Structures are given as C-alpha cells and as structure tokens.
C-alpha cells in the first residue's frame, strides 16, 4: 500500500472512532438527563402491565407519578400506546382528568421524549408492533415507556370512600366531578372503556377554610379509544356517540350489556358510571375473587351468586333493577337518572353532556335541601 493511501485509511479510522465516541457520549447524556430529571421515591402501584412510582422532578421539587410500562409483548405495547394517544390528544387540561406531563421512550439506556406522529424509528417500531400484533424490533432490546403524570396522594376511589363514613356532601361532589370529567373526555372524542373506582384516583387538597377537599382524577387510559372520525356528513361535528367499537374490553362488573356483545359506543362509559354512582350513593360493594379486595360496584344476585349487571341485562333486557336498594337513600331525580344510565338499550341512556347538566341540577337541589 502506498504511503498516502495508508494515511487516508488511518484518517478514516480516526474519524469513525471519533464519531462512535461522540454517539456514545450523546446516548450517555440523554440517559443521564432523563434519569437525573426525576428521582423515583417509592413504588405506589403495580398493575398487570407496569409499575407506578411516586417521584420528584429534581429541578422544581414537584411530586409526580411515573408509570413505567415494559414493552415486551404486543399487548403491553398496545396498552401503552393507547394511553399515550389518549392523554397526548388532549389539548387543554381538566381538573378531573389525569394530566400527562411527558412520555419518555427508553431503549437500552437511550431515552427520548415521545411525540404524537413522531417519525423516530423507535416510535414507529412500537406502532408497527401494535398494528401487526407481533414484536417488530430486536426482542433483546428492553423498551420502556415512562408516563410522567400528576401525583395523586389520596389513593383510589375505593380506598378513599371505603375508609371513611358515608357522606352525602362527598358523594355529591364526586358525582359532579365524574360527570364533568366524562363530558370533557367525550367532547375530546375519548372513550375510556375501563371506568371503575380503581382507575379513579384522588388528590387531597384543602379549601380556603382548611377543610379537606378531595379532587378526583380519571386515570388509566390503557383501554381507551380516541374516535377521530367525524360522521358521514363532514359538516356535522364528530360525535363520540356515533363511533362504533367492537373490541369487547373493560372490567366485567362495570361493562355494559352491548360491550359483552362487542358492538358499542361511548354510551358504554355512561353505563359504567351508572354502576359506580349507584354503588357510591348506596355503598354497594363486592369482594373481588382474585385480590380479595372490597370494591364499590353494583350487581344483581341470582341464586346466591352475584352477577355483573351488564351480563344479567344481556340475558334479560327487561329485568327490573331495584334502585334504590335501600329506601330513602336517594331522591326521585337521582333514582330516575341512575335507571336511565343503566338502561339495557344504550339509546335510552343520556349522553355525557346531558348527564353533566342533570347531575348539576340534582346537586343544586341537594344543596337547597341541606340549607
Ligand atoms: N398518577 C398517579 N398517582 C398516584 N398513584 C397512581 C397514579 N397512577 C397510578 N397510580 C397507582 O397505580 C395503580 C395502577 O395504575 P393504573 O394506571 O390503573 O395502571 P394499570 O393499567 O396497571 O391498572 C393505581 O391503581 C394507583 O394505585
Ligand atoms: Mg388500572
């Protein structure tokens, strides 16, 4: 080899080594930047798909929750992307819906902020995995999605309510907050599909006079669906109540009859909320067989067994529900509203916007009653 050719080859080797070193330093900086940004304090929840930590944002000292989902199966990836798409599609914040501060995608120590419609190859590999139903990346790579959200210090709605004496004031406030959250979500074309007290978290705050004032936050959007298609007529605003879905999903005690059949709309969320509100007002609970936890939820009793209401209504849509279960536990308007929310026919249920208004009216009457 000539001397000049040798020199050129050496220069190329030096340049390649410098580029590799720069890339390694860039990766190191990205990892340490994201790790340094949040300090994980303790584990606060563990679901079937991920772990949730209480954490602190180092720069501000603000408490946050970090939900870390390992993307090692198509199911986990789909769940994580659903949560990301729903929470990142919300343009404005709502006090009763969990707020996503950022979502970070981490692979083998390399971390990058996720953005909707990103063309990054990591993001596209996840989308491909979810669409194909099979892992579209090297299975040796460990992918994680970190969801950084508001931290809720009051536990979930089950734990909160069941550890306190029933209070009409709290029930009324919770009803209003839930009605407002659902109207907001449906206005933003989001169907939650897994509303249940476990997925409704509490932030404990205080009023100006110092009395406790819990704020509900609807969380866990892993099964949610963003319905972005408008009606056939482009002039017509997109209605979440006309978006038909077919994936039967949710948690059986809160599932509407049509969800069991696999043909439903956003009205399935109204049914789930009907189960929750009825159970909250009358303190109806059952024990979950798997976890042995006491949960708020209304059901029917058939031959000594408890059966989810939606399942029972699917078999017998004309079944009369015993609302209220106890005399004088609610007024006539509330009774009528819960009955409508739990109609076997989704068209007979109010939509989220009407529901919000009716809950406000009921709450105003309750306040008149109290004073
Ligand atoms: N923002 C949060 N603040 C405090 N705790 C949380 C937060 N998000 C989740 N958790 C805790 O972690 C649990 C599981 O979170 P969730 O989002 O429901 O995930 P999963 O899909 O595993 O059910 C919750 O029931 C709650 O106890
Ligand atoms: Mg959950």
Image (cartoon, rainbow, N blue to C red):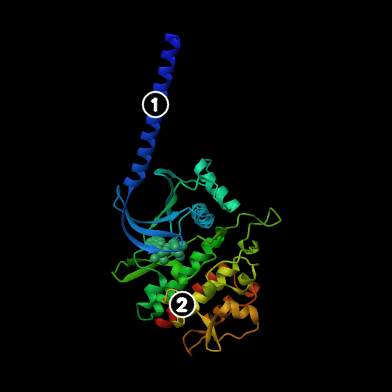
Where 59 sits versus 347, above or below? above
Separation of marks 2 and 1 at Cα, in angstroms: 59 Å
Disc 2 target residue:
289
Query: Image point 40% across, 59% down: which residue?
Result: 51
Q: Quadrant of the C terminus?
A: bottom left
Q: Which mark is in front, 2 or 1?
A: 1
* Residue at image coords 37%, 42%: 31
Quarter of the figure with residue 172:
bottom left
| CB at disc 2 and ligand 1 closer than 8 Å | no
- The residue labelled by disc 1 is 17
Q: Quadrant of ligand 1?
A: bottom left
Q: Nearer the viewer, residue 110 or 217?
A: 110
Total tally of numbered discs in the picture: 2
Q: Is residue 13 left or right of residue 262?
A: left
Quadrant assignment, res 272: bottom right
SS category of the residue bearing label 1:
helix
Q: Residue furthest right?
A: 232
Mark 2 packing: few (<14 Cα in 10 Å), some, or many (20+)? few
Q: Position of residue 209 (x, y in %)?
A: 29, 69
Residue 219 appears in the picture as rendered: no
Q: Is residue 139 above or below residue 268?
A: above
Q: Quadrant of the N terminus?
A: top left
Whichever of callouts 2 and 1 sits on the residue coming sooner in the sequence is: 1
Residue toward you, 315 or 136: 136
Q: Which mark is residue 207?
A: none
The residue under the point 52% across, 76% down is 275
Vertical position of residue 116 compared to residue 191: above or below: above
Residue 87: percent from the left, percent from the top? 49, 55
Rendered location of residue 281, percent (x, y): 46, 80
Residue 112, quarter of the rendered image: top left
* x 44%, y 50%: residue: 144
Look at the numbered disc 2 and give the secondary structure of its residue: loop
């Amino acid at each position: 080899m000539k001397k000049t050719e040798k020199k050129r080859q050496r220069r190329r080797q030096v340049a390649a080594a410098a580029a590799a070193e720069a890339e390694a330093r860039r990766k190191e900086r990205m990892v340490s930047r994201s790790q340094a940004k949040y300090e994980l304090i303790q584990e606060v929840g563990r679901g079937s798909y991920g772990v949730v930590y209480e954490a602190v944002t180092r720069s501000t000292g603000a408490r946050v929750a970090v939900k870390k989902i390992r993307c090692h199966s198509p199911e986990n990836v789909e769940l994580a992307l659903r949560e990301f798409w729903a929470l990142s599609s919300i343009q404005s914040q709502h006090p009763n819906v969990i707020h996503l501060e950022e979502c970070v995608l981490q692979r083998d120590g390399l971390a990058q902020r996720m953005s909707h419609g990103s063309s990054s190859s990591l993001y596209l590999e996840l989308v491909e995995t979810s669409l194909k139903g099979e892992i579209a990346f090297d299975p040796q790579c460990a992918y994680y999605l970190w969801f950084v959200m508001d931290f809720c210090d009051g536990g979930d709605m089950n734990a909160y309510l069941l550890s306190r004496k029933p209070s009409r004031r709290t029930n009324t406030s919770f009803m209003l907050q839930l009605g407002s959250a659902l109207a907001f979500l449906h206005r933003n074309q989001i169907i939650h599909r897994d509303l249940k007290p476990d997925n409704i978290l509490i932030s404990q705050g205080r009023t100006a006079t110092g009395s406790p004032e819990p704020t509900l936050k609807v969380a866990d959007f892993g099964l949610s669906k963003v319905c972005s298609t408008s009606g056939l007529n482009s002039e017509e605003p997109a209605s979440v109540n006309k978006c038909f879905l077919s994936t039967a999903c949710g948690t059986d005690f809160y599932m509407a009859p049509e969800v069991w059949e696999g043909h439903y709309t956003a009205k399935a969320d109204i049914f789930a909320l009907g189960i929750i509100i009825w159970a909250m007002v009358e303190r109806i609970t059952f024990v979950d067989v798997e976890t042995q936890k006491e949960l708020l939820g209304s059901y029917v009793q058939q031959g000594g067994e408890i059966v989810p209401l939606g399942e029972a209504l699917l078999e017998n849509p004309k079944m009369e529900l015993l609302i209220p279960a106890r005399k004088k536990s609610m007024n006539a308007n509330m009774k009528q509203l819960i009955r409508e929310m739990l109609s076997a026919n989704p068209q007979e249920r109010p939509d989220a916007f009407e529901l919000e208004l009716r809950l406000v009216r009921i709450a105003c009457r309750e306040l008149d009653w109290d004073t």
